[in-house]
Image (cartoon, helix red, strand yellow):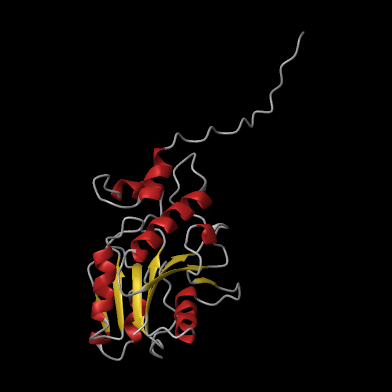
Amino acid sequence: MRRVAAALVTGPSTAAPPGVDPAAFALAMAEDVYDTLAGLELLTAGLVAGPRAPHGLDELVWPGTPLIRLPDDGSEPTRAALDQFAAAGADQAALVAADAPDLPPLLVGKLFRALGSAPVAVCPTADGRLVALAARLPAPGWLGPVDLDGPDAMGALAGAPRRRDVAVGPGWHRLTAPADLALLDPGLEGWDATRTLLSRPPAPAPDRSGSTTGGG
């Protein structure tokens, strides 16, 4: 059985604090999520890049790592990525939001274990979005567009024929606003790239005053 777990990068980070470039922050978090997935056994770790994903993702991973670039055709990235992994021969796949740099690997492992009894498994956030979604492949026909970033991503799974067709695992958090940085636990192992970026002094704000000096 071939398993794939990939970090889904949709665009520059909306959680970047002042002085930190949103694209660089998105890359740091994606690197941490990828490293978490790459440390899991019996699966292949990869990346999925949406149309607005920052450049430089291919520099974060080992050569030969699956890197799917989704077309800018308006298609919902979660289903599109699952379909591409199925076409590549995967039996199971998990998509993990790339703005969860401190996600414990145990939670990803639980999603794959849940696929033994359900065709879809999810890790939710407290506000109804999804941190990760895993599915047997090819994904079931009832699984329509499920946007991990959607405010009611859990509600989008209501089309499952039976409640037990969607296994809901323990929840976690995502970093979607600067205030969410308070959720990061400095004592928790991992999220090294994000930690390093946040520890750097903020870049000075550009001088936009336009003032000039001269002798009088």
Judge left or right: residue 206 versus residue 126. Answer: right
> Which residue is at 23% across, 45% downward?
187
Judge left or right: residue 134 versus residue 80. Answer: left
Judge left or right: residue 206 versus residue 24. Answer: right
Q: Position of residue 199 (x, y in %)?
A: 39, 38
Q: Position of residue 175 (x, y in %)?
A: 37, 54
Instruction: Using the rendered view, name the quadrant where residue 200 is placed.
Output: top left
| 13 lies above or below 162 | above
Q: Locate the N terminus by quadrant.
A: bottom left
Q: Locate the C terminus by quadrant.
A: top right
> Which residue is at 41% across, 51% downward?
177
> Which residue is at 37% across, 65% downward?
38
The extreme front residue here reads 63
| 173 lies above or below 145 | above
Q: Position of residue 198 (x, y in %)?
A: 40, 42
| 201 lies above or below 187 | above
Quick one: 18 or 200, which is closer to the camera? 200
Instruction: Using the rendered view, name the quadrant where residue 170 is placed.
Output: bottom left
Q: Position of residue 141 (x, y in %)?
A: 41, 91
